[in-house]
Image (cartoon, rainbow, N blue to C red):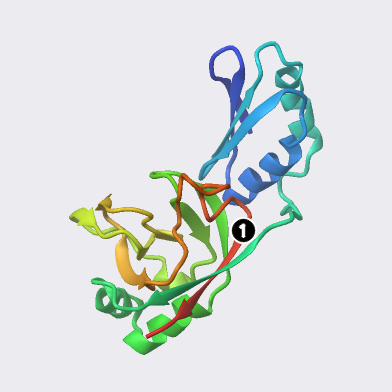
Amino acid sequence: MRLRRCGPDAVLVEVDSLGAVAAARAALVGLPGLVELVPAARTVLVSFEPGSPGLRQVQAVLEQADLSAAPVVDSAEVTLPVVYEGADLELVAETAGLSVAETIALHSGADYTVAFCGFAPGFAYLTGLPEPLCQPRLDNPRTRVPAGSVGVAGEFTGIYPRSSPGGWRLVARLADDAAALFDPTREPAALLSPGDRVRFEAVS
């Protein structure tokens, strides 16, 4: 674990795994003056109100925490209806050594957890992707990925909340009646938050 100061009122916690990120985030909730915890793949940014004593407590709290233990958290369960007709579905199946039907069953049958959010508002990085589907990004990223596209990249699966460039391998899209991943008029605006459990429901 390494701590790096980020200006006068924040610190970046660097750890070795996604599990440690979740454990560190859980341990730091409740520190006095805490403004925001921003988890990523191997870091947690912790920001405080100016002059808060919480900043001085970060290291001691983390040294006492078991960062190897998965935290028990209250989380939402979200089921997302998706249509498996992604542009790279056959490529993903071929790379995995599976049929398209087997690939759909494997992806939709897994239980996922939101590890962190980023890249775009409402974009959640989901862990739990079955090993055969853990595949590299495309060699040549697309200049435009349609909103609602479901892709895989490395150890993650995720959904593009809006149209944007991207290099993930696309396997599906959100069904037309799925809830918006990000709606600034809604509270909270993002449908998915770190710790939430997610399942994909294959629909026609």
Q: x, y (%) of residue 96?
A: 35, 77
46 vs 184: above or below: above
Question: How many numbered marks are there?
Answer: 1
Whether residue 193 is visible, yes or no, is yes
Identified by mark 1, the residue type is Asp
In this view, the residue in front, 2 or 112, is 112
**Is 110 placed above or below 65 here?**
below
Residue at 45% x, 51% y is 182
Where residue 61 sits: x, y (%)?
A: 78, 31
Q: Position of residue 60 (x, y in %)?
A: 78, 26
Residue under the point 34% across and 72% down: 172
* Residue 83 pos. (x, y %): 36, 78
Q: Is residue 185 left or right of residue 195?
A: left
Quarter of the N terminus within the rendering: top right
139 vs 7: above or below: below
Which residue sits at x=33%, y=72%?
Answer: 171
Residue 142 appears in the picture as rendered: no
Residue 180, quarter of picture: bottom left
Q: Taking 40 as reference, is 79 above or below it? A: below
Circle 1: element type: loop
Is the C terminus in the top left, top right, bottom left or bottom right quadrant? bottom left
Q: Which residue is mark 1?
A: 196
